[in-house]
Image (cartoon, rainbow, N blue to C red):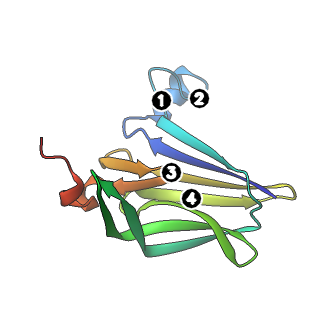
Amino acid sequence: MTCRIHFYLLNDHYSQEYADEQNNGEPSEMNRKYLWEDEFAIKTKVTKVDARDYSTYPLQGKSGETPFTEEIADMRLFYLMDMDTPVAVVGCSEVLLDSYSIQEGEEEIVLEAYMKGEEPLANPVTGIYIASRYFPKKLISQE
């Protein structure tokens, strides 16, 4: 089964009332529902999505030549599974999450996650969104 993932950043200034009055209930260029959308397709087989709330994400990388691992708490992580084996993980800070849905069809699984637009965030790794207030301070450049 294939898997598509959509992360949407909601526009706090979107007005459904204005859309109803001015554009037959639809968003418009002047009244956008989402500020942006990230869409991913997972090429490996995914048979289910396991959502885990208030999880810890191990952010790993290098700062210059120095490797680091930072644990990011309070994340909503979505483990993309092939049977009982994780093939990928995506997610966001709990404080960012507005809602999400998982649709499991015959041929495809679709995960849609909606994030609140008022909270600043960082996207250090594809599919991982961390609220700025939880981003490790020592990883922020002090230039």
- What label does residue 91 carry, if any? none
Q: List x then y, in percent, for residue 119.
A: 31, 49
In primary-sequence order, the first of circles 3 and 2 is 2
In primary-sequence order, the first of circles 3 and 4 is 4
Q: List x then y, in percent, for residue 110.
A: 70, 54
Task: Name the residue tied to disc 3.
Answer: 114
For residue 30, side relative to residue 85 (left or right): left
Q: The residue under label 4 is which amino acid type?
A: Tyr
Q: The residue under label 3 is which amino acid type?
A: Tyr
- Cα separation, mark 3 vs mark 2, equals 18 Å
Q: The residue under label 1 is which amino acid type?
A: Arg
| Crowd band around label 1 with a 10 angstrom C-alpha radius: few (<14), some (14–19), many (20+) | some
| Residue 35 vs residue 70, the one in the foreground | 70
| Crowd band around label 2 with a 10 angstrom C-alpha radius: few (<14), some (14–19), many (20+) | some
Which secondary structure lies at badge 1?
loop
**Pointer 3 with pointer 4, Cβ within 8 A:** yes
Task: Name the residue tied to disc 1.
Answer: 32
